[in-house]
Amino acid sequence: MQPFQCLTAPACPLPYANIDTDQMIPARFMKRSRAEGYGGYLLHDMRFSSSGREIADFPLNQTPYRNAQIIVARRNFGAGSSREAAVYALVDYGVRCVIAPSFGDIFASNSVNNGLLPAKVGERDGEALIGLLQETHAELTVDLEAQTISVKGISVPFVIDPVWRTKLLNGWDDIDITLSQADAIARFREEDSLIRPWVTPRIRDGAGQTTM
Amino acid sequence: MAGSPSGPRTLFDKLWDSHAIVTREDGQTLLWVDRHFVHEGSFHAFNKLTERDARVAHPELTFGIADHYVPTRRSGRSIDPAIQNMIDQLARNTLENDVLLFGLNDPRQGIVHVVGPEQGLTLPGLLIVCGDSHTSTHGAFGAWGFGIGASEVAHVLMTQTLWQRRPKRMRITVDGTLAPGIGAKDIALSIIARIGADGAQGHAVEYAGSAIRALSMEGRLTLCNLSIEAGARCGMVAPDETTIAYLRGRPFAPAGDEFERAAEDWLRLQSDEDAEFDREIILNGSEIAPVVTWGVSPEDALPITMAVPDPEVISDPSKAAQIRDALAYMDLRPGQKLTDVSIDRVFIGSCTNSRIEDLRAAAQVLFGRKAKVPGLVSPGSSLVKQQAESEGLDRIFKEAGLEWVESGCSMCVGMNGDIVQPGERCASTTNRNFKGRQGPGARTHLMSPAMVAAAAVTGSLADVRRLIEERS
């Protein structure tokens, strides 16, 4: 996974609350293989009309914001469905950081697992960044080490779970860390089967595998 | 410290402690996963396994269910090849990994959050995950269920564990008696309207109080299902005699003496009397009215007796902008009475409200009446469908003019092709009124099954209490 340390990049304001993961990638695109890239589907129905034309006043369709690698949105970004495809759409589009006052928990966790930084800011700071980006089309600098977002001499702090911060800074993948705990897992399993014998599902009832 | 193993603990703390394998210095804990459900959408995770040349570590704790993409009109119809491919892919992935699959033609097939409890795969005290945010549903049994993303699904497939940080704890107490026609959906939407769609973010919720205790398992499943719509990590109800009675005799649950011993353990899964919660919310059950949503987030919910909100009288500019945007999408006028909003279609189904009790509640309103709009009724599982048919409920739906179809996620998520047409307004028993959730340009109003039935026969959003009164 690509580490995230410090990023200076164009940013796009999305002055909407509750941008859910259904908005980020509508369900109808989710049958496709990731190999095709999901960037074209990002916020599809907000970016494109039903005839497939770009909606001119949607920020991400405007020249200064089109190449944004940072998005600044309002509260509850990424609520809803656990679809990791929402994060794939952001990442494949080129987004590396989303700034908002609050995030859906599952979305935030999925983001970190894909090297995308969910940076939580105060509501007032978020509004200030949105206002500034609407006026000046500036680049933002997001420094994960220092946990600050700076632009034109202004600097605002952001919050992130310290474990997620370490994971993003180093580009770590959980599975290797977990596999190194194999002994502890086996010990737990042995003791647990005595304490909670009812956990194991009763023997499969003979109906077996039906494949279609 | 509150929540430590020595002091008084909440139900959630007890579940946490019983699943903790190791805790790192940074506070991350590795947790054992008791049940893992996979569905057609889990293909990204299986692909990650293939990339690492890995197999499912514990197939005996992993169960496959075809629900998200399955067609609901099956006999004699050809299936869209892209959808068939999703179903086949799941069959291949589960077969290759020796995972039991409730596939398209299995008599037990249905929606994962209906089938799990129905089969006794969901038990109190279990940690249950699935790549679906509504896994919170299983908390109805005093289990700890939560949705995860594809990377985490792959992690669980490979290790049967997950790293988590302990969430905060919230208790939502609902005392009092619900009025006739009011159900779990009305409780849940009232809670979300009060605390917001992000109101429980970072929290494990426990539902308590006499109104919750009085709910059937079906009602508790609906309530816990909607925990995620308040942003909660999970929602749970402590096991009691209602829970035990439901579980007895379920195919995958323990049987005989083993069941009785397990039941003793399960009934001990309660929050200690003086356990501390980080946040407490209290609602009076007798004040809850039938609720409908008017906007594009489940927090945009109001009693049916109210009117569409007016953004001009909202002082917070971003909140006002949010309302303006929602009303434009929903094509509603500020101040319009909710009962004046006409609808084009109804849907009864989804992991939120498709169980036998839900179908009975809707059928009770529809009995002897005609729907003024078309609609779809999709039972939560093939076994629920069978049960409903044995009670004659299918005839009531059909005679009212609604279509009675097979089980699946169907029009809640629109993946299988069951969608609401652009611009159409649907009264729906589902969980999300997000823009485009039921299809591009679809307008969704969430409500209980009884309220959807009332809307169907009225042709507009309606107060089901009126229709109940007409009967008596």
Image (cartoon, coloured by chain):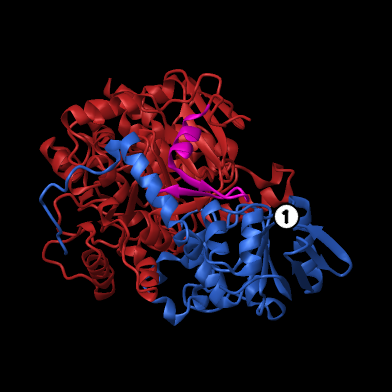
Based on the picture, tell me whether residue B29 belongs to the magenta stretch.
yes
- Quarter of the figure that contains the C terminus of chain A: bottom left
Q: Find residue B88 and report its horizontal and vertical position in percent.
A: 23, 69
Residue at the image point whose x is 25% and y is 46% from the top: B115
Of the residues shown, which amino acid type is indicated by label 1?
Answer: Val
> What residue range appears in magenta?
B9-32
Residue A188 lies in quadrant: top left
Q: Find residue B347 and report its horizontal and vertical position in percent.
A: 32, 49
Horizontal side of residue B191 vs B211, given as left or right: right
Task: Give the letter of the red chain.
Answer: B
Q: Disc 1 marks which residue?
A: A121
Q: Find residue B434 and report its horizontal and vertical position in percent.
A: 49, 55
Compared with B161, B283 (above or below) is above
- Quarter of the figure that contains the N terminus of chain A: bottom right
Q: Find residue B12 and report its horizontal and vertical position in percent.
A: 48, 34
Q: Which is nearer the eye, A2 or B387?
A: A2
Task: Give the letter of the blue chain.
Answer: A
Based on the picture, tell me whether residue A126 belongs to the magenta stretch.
no
Label 1 resides on the chain identified as A
Q: Is residue B337 visible?
A: yes
How dense is the environment of label 1, judged by Cα within 10 Å: few (below 14), some, or many (20 and up)? many
Q: Which is nearer the eye, B51 or B148?
A: B51
Residue B96 lies in quadrant: bottom left
Compared with B180, B113 (above or below) is below
